[in-house]
Image (tube, helix red, strand yellow):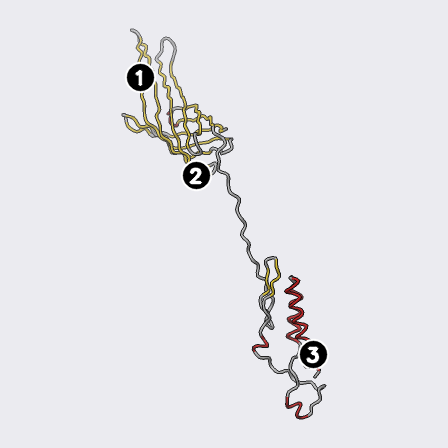
């Protein structure tokens, strides 16, 4: 009779514990482990019929009968809140906490261009020799550029001389790439004005001419959206009636 009362008391204590854990959102694994150990260790078998028939005293020690499958089933999972839950506990097993991952929304990246003007010096490039350039962004990814370069050799009254002036006019597309790092694709014209003077013992001669050639740009371009240091480097060929002249250029300046 004492064993039966002890089993009923243990079962009632376990039910009360899990009711409190569900209501108060218990977060301590130590308390759950202690309660599970109490259920496993407490004897729950009543005196057998053979003991009752033979008059065995209730104070005698009786071997506990093996539990059935229904008795060995673990209590249901207990939610603990804050993204944790307790898995069912079987005798000899440990309580497992399963975290729940909550996705975090990413902050959108601002890709609006606020620096719309650029001034830079280019060595080589579309002007062949060098050029000083001004560029204006017409939209987020489209720009127009004009530059000028000049080179003269010789000089003096009694010596030969020659000069070359170049004016590149370009339209550039910078829609390939991400943020400040872009691929620049450009096309346009470069106007070349050439002069020459020769001096010999008899007299001197002078000549000049203008040539327009097509030009293109395939280059890496660093042009910060909010302004700052501007850099470019790439392939800048010229195409004219004389053929294709491969050229390369490197430029640096500021965008604002």
In front of the other: 69 or 201:
69
Which of the marked residues, 1 or 2, is nearer the chain's N terminus? 2
| Closer mark to the observer between disc 1 and disc 2 | 2
Quadrant assignment, res 161: top left
Rendering coords of residue 225 (x, y %): 49, 34
| Residue at x 32%, y 15% (from the top left corner) | 208
CA–CA distance between discs 3 and 1? 116 Å
Residue extending furthest toward the right: 59
Residue 6: mark: 3
Q: Mark 1 points at which residue?
A: 209
Rendering coords of residue 71 (x, y %): 59, 77
The answer to whether mark 3 and mark 2 are in CB contact below 8 A is: no
Q: Name the residue under label 2.
A: 177
Side of 76 where 175 appears, left or right: left
Residue extending furthest toward the top: 202
| Residue at x 34%, y 15% (from the top left corner) | 195
Rendering coords of residue 31 (x, y %): 67, 66
Report the quarter where the N terminus lies.
bottom right
Residue extending furthest toward the bottom: 54
Side of 253 where 211 appears, left or right: left
In front of the other: 156 or 114:
114
Residue extending furthest toward the left: 241
| Above or below 33: residue 120 | above
Find numbered disc 3 in the image and state the secondary structure of the residue it sits on.
helix
Report crowding for label 1: few under 14, some 14 to 19, many 20 or more residues within 10 A (C-alpha). Answer: few
| Above or below 223: residue 134 | above
Rendering coords of residue 58 (x, y %): 71, 86
| Residue at x 46%, y 31% (from the top left corner) | 231
| Closer mark to the observer between disc 3 and disc 2 | 3
Find numbered disc 2 in the image and state the secondary structure of the residue it sits on.
strand
Side of 122 where 78 appears, left or right: right
């Amino acid at each position: 009779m004492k064993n039966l009362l002890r089993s009923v008391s243990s079962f009632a204590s376990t039910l009360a514990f899990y009711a409190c854990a569900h209501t108060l959102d218990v977060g301590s694994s130590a308390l759950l482990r202690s309660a599970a150990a109490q259920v496993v260790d407490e004897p729950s078998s009543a005196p057998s019929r053979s003991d009752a028939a033979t008059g065995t005293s209730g104070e005698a020690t009786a071997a506990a009968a093996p539990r059935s499958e229904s008795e060995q089933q673990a209590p249901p999972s207990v939610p603990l809140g804050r993204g944790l839950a307790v898995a069912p506990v079987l005798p000899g097993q440990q309580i497992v906490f399963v975290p729940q991952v909550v996705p975090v929304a990413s902050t959108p990246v601002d890709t609006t261009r606020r620096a719309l003007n650029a001034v830079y010096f280019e060595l080589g490039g579309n002007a062949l020799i060098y050029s000083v350039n001004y560029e204006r962004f017409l939209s987020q990814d489209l720009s127009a550029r004009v530059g000028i370069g000049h080179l003269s050799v010789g000089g003096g009254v009694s010596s030969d001389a020659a000069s070359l002036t170049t004016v590149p006019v370009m339209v550039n597309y910078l829609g390939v790439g991400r943020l400040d790092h872009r691929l620049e694709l450009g096309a346009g014209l470069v106007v070349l004005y050439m002069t020459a003077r020769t001096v010999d013992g008899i007299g001197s001669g002078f000549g000049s001419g203008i040539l327009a050639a097509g030009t293109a740009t395939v280059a890496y371009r660093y042009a910060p959206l909010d302004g700052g240091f501007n850099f470019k480097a790439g392939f800048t060929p010229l195409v004219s009636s004389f053929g294709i002249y491969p050229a390369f250029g490197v430029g640096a300046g500021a965008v604002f």
